[in-house]
């Protein structure tokens, strides 16, 4: 028996912890020594483990996207083998001379020669009537970055006024199933003077079109659909094949790809990146003007690489 220190009541050994009389706590039997804090529960351990795994996964993703030029290039790349590196460097960075061509949205042009040269007169453009520098774009309608850079190009044309033109060269990539048909549709429409309108529709469709789609676009634009269909499998097909051959020969295996006054810009870069390149090209062009060349001759020099000059 034990006695409560508060009220003096005797307690049974069967309930030594609490006094039955007053409810006061009684000293219990001695306990063996042990840890002062309870062991963590399994639920707590699982939470810590999950947090560690999540941190490790986040670190892996950050490392993957931090490396390599392709992670931030803003462009699509084909799986085909690249063309000769030396030819690419010489053709894209050299300042040369050659004739120029048709307005954006009109004219037939001619398919490229078998030696992978392009006639600048055969390419669509938009921009100033008497420019100094061409922004030559190699694009693919099914490439999301070709679509995204369109707004940047429009702003550049407004920013630099009549000193600049944008020239478009089709470069449908092998990794895109519909890009070649889309390019042929744009060329077939260009033969009837409606390249710009078809260009916009193809970009809005993400380039993912079949023959029924492009024929519907042709009808919407009031084109001669019989002629459009014939050009789609004939003249336009040959033209796009020539442009693609030029791109591959010069190692242009991604889109969008730009040559601006002999300087290369790859991908859908921010406007200021393009602006700095254009400004440098215009500075070079004005130097040639000061040396006695005409605006036309200076502009032709920014396009002559297309003819192998």
Image (cartoon, rainbow, N blue to C red):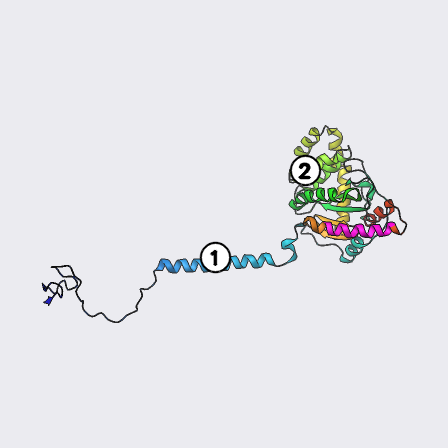
Q: Residue at x 54, y 59 (%)?
A: 60
Residue projecting furthest to the bottom: 33
The reply to whether the magenta stretch includes residue 199 is no
> What kind of element bears circle 1?
helix
Q: Disc number at residue 242?
A: none
Q: Residues within 10 Å of mark 2 (few under 14, many from 20)?
A: many
User: Of 308 and 240, which appears nearest the observer?
Assistant: 308
Q: Secondary structure at mark 2?
A: helix
Q: Is residue 80 above or below residue 166?
A: below
- Is residue 293 placed above or below 234 in the rendered structure? below
Is 278 colored magenta in this rendering? yes
Q: Position of residue 155 (x, y in %)?
A: 71, 43
- Report the side of 37 relative to 217 (left or right): left
Quarter of the image with the N terminus in it: bottom left
Q: Nearer the viewer, mark 1 or mark 2?
A: 1
The region drawn magenta spans 275-289
Residue 62, horizontal then vertical, whole percent: 56, 57
Q: CA distance from mark 1 to mark 2?
A: 42 Å
Query: Which is nearer the N-term, disc 1 or disc 2?
Result: 1
Q: Relative to the observer, which residue lies in front, 237 or 194? A: 194
Observer-nearest of 207 and 67:
67
- In the rendered image, which quarter is residue 7 located in? bottom left
Q: Which residue in the protein does label 1 denote? A: 54
Q: Are marks 1 and 2 in contact (CB under 8 Å)?
A: no
- The image shows residue 99 at horizontal and vertical percentages of 86, 44
- Residue under the point 86% across and 51% down: 288
Q: Which residue position is annotated with label 2?
A: 202
Left/right placement of residue 4 relative to residue 180 reads left
């Amino acid at each position: 028996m034990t006695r409560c220190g508060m009220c003096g009541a005797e307690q049974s050994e069967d309930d030594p912890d609490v006094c039955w009389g007053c409810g006061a706590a009684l000293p219990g039997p001695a306990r063996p020594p042990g840890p002062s804090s309870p062991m963590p529960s399994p639920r707590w351990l699982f939470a810590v483990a999950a947090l560690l795994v999540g941190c490790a996964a986040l670190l892996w993703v950050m490392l993957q996207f931090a490396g390599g030029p392709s992670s931030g290039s803003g462009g699509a790349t084909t799986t085909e083998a690249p063309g000769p590196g030396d030819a690419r460097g010489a053709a894209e960075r050299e300042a040369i001379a050659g004739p120029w061509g048709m307005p954006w949205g009109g004219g037939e042009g001619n398919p490229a020669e078998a030696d992978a040269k392009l006639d600048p007169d055969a390419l669509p453009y938009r921009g100033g009537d008497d420019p100094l520098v061409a922004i030559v774009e190699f694009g693919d309608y099914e490439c999301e970055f070709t679509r995204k850079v369109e707004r940047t190009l429009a702003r550049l044309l407004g920013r630099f006024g009549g000193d600049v033109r944008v020239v478009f060269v089709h470069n449908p990539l092998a990794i895109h199933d519909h890009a070649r048909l889309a390019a042929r549709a744009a060329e077939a429409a260009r033969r009837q003077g409606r390249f710009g309108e078809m260009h916009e529709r193809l970009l809005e469709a993400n380039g993912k079109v079949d023959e029924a789609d492009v024929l519907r676009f042709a009808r919407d634009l009031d084109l001669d659909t019989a002629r459009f269909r014939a050009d789609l499998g004939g003249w336009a097909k040959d033209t796009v094949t020539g442009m693609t051959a030029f791109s591959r020969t010069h190692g242009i295996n991604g889109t969008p790809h730009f040559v601006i006054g002999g300087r290369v810009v790859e991908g859908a870069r921010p406007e200021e990146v393009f602006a700095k390149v254009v400004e440098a090209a215009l500075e070079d062009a004005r130097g040639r003007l000061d040396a006695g060349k005409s605006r036309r001759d200076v502009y032709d020099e920014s396009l002559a690489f297309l003819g192998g000059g």
